[in-house]
Amino acid sequence: MALQELLSTPVGLLSLFTILFVVVIAIFFIRFISSSMARDERRAARRREQRAKG
């Protein structure tokens, strides 16, 4: 019953769209933040190496 309402009524379709949109945005933020953290860690490691050498 609930699945039928979710897929057949305008309010249900908007709710489904909103849920999917939030999931996509969450995945984007997780990937973006993870890549930023990895990039910053690589930069910090290079700086530590340069300071150790110099």
Image: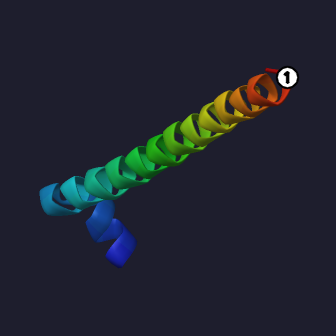
Against 1, is 5 above or below?
A: above
Colour scheme used in the picture? rainbow
Q: Secondary structure at mark 1?
A: helix
Q: Position of residue 34 (x, y in %)?
A: 60, 43
Seen in the image, is 49 located left or right of residue 35? right
Seen in the image, is 31 located left or right of residue 45? left
Q: Name the outermost residue toward the left.
A: 10
Q: Position of residue 29 (x, y in %)?
A: 45, 45
> Residue 13 appears in which quarter of the rendering?
bottom left
- Tell me which residue sits at (47%, 40%) in the image: 28
Q: 31 or 51, which lies in front?
A: 51
- Tell me which residue sits at (59%, 42%) in the image: 37
- Tell me which residue sits at (23%, 62%) in the image: 12
Q: How many labels sit on residues? A: 1
Quadrant location, the C terminus: top right
Q: Amino acid at mark 1?
A: Lys
User: Badge 1: few (under 14), some or many (20 or more) residues near its Cα, within 10 Å?
Assistant: few
Q: Position of residue 47 (x, y in %)?
A: 69, 28
Quadrant location, the N terminus: bottom left
Q: Position of residue 15 (x, y in %)?
A: 24, 61
Against 42, is 28 above or below?
A: below
Against 14, is 38 above or below?
A: above
> Residue 11 appears in which quarter of the rendering?
bottom left
- Tell me which residue sits at (38%, 51%) in the image: 20
Q: Which residue is mark 1?
A: 53
Seen in the image, is 1 located left or right of residue 48? left
Q: Name the outermost residue toward the bottom.
A: 1
Q: Name the outermost residue toward the right.
A: 53
Q: 37 or 32, which lies in front?
A: 37
Q: Name the outermost residue toward the front.
A: 54
